[in-house]
Amino acid sequence: MKKIIKYVIIDILRNKIVLAYTAFLLLISITIFNLEDNSAKGLLSLLNIILIIVPLVSMLFPAIYVYNSSEFLELLVSQPLKRKTIWLSLFLGLAASMAFAFFIGAGIPILLYEATPTGFMMLGAGLLLSVIFVAIAMLAAVMARDKAKGIGVVVLLWLYFSIIFDGLILFVLFQFADYPLEKIMVGAVAFNPIDLSRILILLKMDVSALMGYTGAIFKDFFGAQTGLILSFAVLFTWIIIPAWLSLRKFNHKDL
Amino acid sequence: MIIASNVSKKFGKLKTLDDVSVTCLKGECIALIGPNGCGKTTLIKSILGMVVCDSGFITFNGNNIRHDWKYRARIGYMPQIGRYPENMTIGQVLDMMKDIRGCKNENLDEELISKFGLNDVLKKRMSTLSGGTRQKVSAALAFLFNPEVLILDEPTAGLDPVSSEMLKAKIITEKNKGKLVLITSHILSELDDLISQVIYMQDGRICFHKSITNLQQETGETKLSKAIAHVMLKR
């Protein structure tokens, strides 16, 4: 398993896209922290950018990578290796590269400028989001045989998680404004890892005071120890379930 | 050594393998022939576990291959179209395969690498290679680990006459060592001095599985191509 992870990571580094992504994140983070006089404000601006870019790159790059390494997978499958080993190595290699890129690109500036609990929460959420979207992208790539279809699905999923889901939530909120929906909203957030991370980070900031009654309910739930543990459990489930489904699919795939 | 029992495989509506049963024993050299799209490559890929069959099972030395993966260490496979990571060099691909198989250097059979002159082009990237050179890499990899079973899918397609003769000579030496060799090819004339058995497939079914001497006696022809033509005309 270690050997294959090694070859995957060497190949990804040779690809230079991940290096460019790291440099891009680094540039954005440092610029933002230097633009704002208050680094807590900088963190808020960075949050919005990261929650758009990290899922997009962490889904597109792995999906394209899986399609482009179909030859490599074919070669490995005809060798004395378990399919499980091959697929998990690919997943771990990709997840490690994306998480490491995030750590270098955004994590180090955060630690340098804003090493507070909010900063650490953002670092943890960013790392988890990187891995979650690698798992989702690999599931999409193993389900769709056609490359264009697979990448299209990935882009749609990204749109869903970053824009459409919020739209749906807003729609429901306005339509049922007369009913008490606050508790249901807490549950609904579990279906979108991006929103969950956003809330976890926002609640660590002072701006959470501006969020009104729903914000108070959120603070009550996510601020408490159990809520925090539960949220991270949900985020880990977002890694495990797609990864497990894709592994099951890959075990029966014809190459 | 390899026994396939009632193997069926469908791709969509198309039945690529339909209730195929074959037995391949040690020391045999079997030609798998048939028209395009009759399921030869699918049969080979299911033996290697690259295609998962819908029903039936395949055993290797008595173990069902579905729950086993170590058996692939004993097979050398040369694919019809060798596909390798495009941005690796020949040397890196060879080293990677050695690393993955975890082989010690003394057990390696590097005869084909040196005969094909691959040592001089180790630095070339796979994406810049011609079809023939790719084929040479595939052949060299199939023989590299001294496997007990050799599965060669159209081994001489795209090779120049000299290399093709080298490969044939190599196949004969390996066969004489008592290895099982499974070859598919459309050039029947080049199979004449290699094989001991013939499997003829059509539309995903096996039409016959005979030894070459049997086939020659039945048809009265000495050349494989004529013998097969004779059988096909009778049908």
Image (cartoon, rainbow, N blue to C red):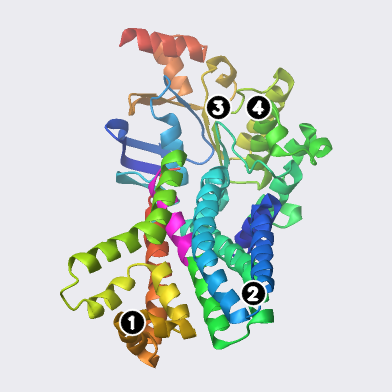
Per the image, label 1 sits on a secondary structure element best described as: helix
Looking at the image, which is closer to me, B151 or B89?
B89
Residue at (69% x, 46% y) in the render: B93
Q: Which mark is residue B154?
A: 3
Q: Pointer 4 indicates a residue of which chain?
A: B
Whole-number angstrom distance, CA of label 4 to CA of label 1: 67 Å
Residue matched to label 4: B131
Q: Pointer 1 indicates a residue of which chain?
A: A
Say whether mark 2 and mark 3 are on the same chain. no
Instruction: Identify the amino acid type marked 2.
Output: Glu
Q: Nearer the viewer, mark 4 or mark 1?
A: 1
**Which stretch appears magenta?**
A132-145
Residue matched to label 1: A212
Q: Disc 3 vs disc 4: Cβ atoms closer than 8 Å?
A: no
Our reading of the magenta stretch's main secondary structure is helix
Is residue A251 shown to the viewer in this render? Answer: no
Per the image, label 3 sits on a secondary structure element best described as: loop
Q: Mark 1 or mark 2: which comes first in sequence? A: 2
Whole-number angstrom distance, CA of label 3 to CA of label 2: 66 Å
Q: Mark 3 or mark 4: which comes first in sequence? A: 4
Residue matched to label 2: A36
In percent of width and height, residue A239 lies at: 43, 68
Position of A119 relative to A132 (above/below): below
Whole-number angstrom distance, CA of label 1 to CA of label 3: 71 Å
Is residue A60 shown to the viewer in this render? Answer: yes
Q: Residue furthest right?
A: B120
Instruction: Identify the amino acid type marked 1.
Output: Gly
Say whether mark 3 and mark 1 are on the same chain. no
Instruction: Identify the amino acid type marked 3.
Output: Glu
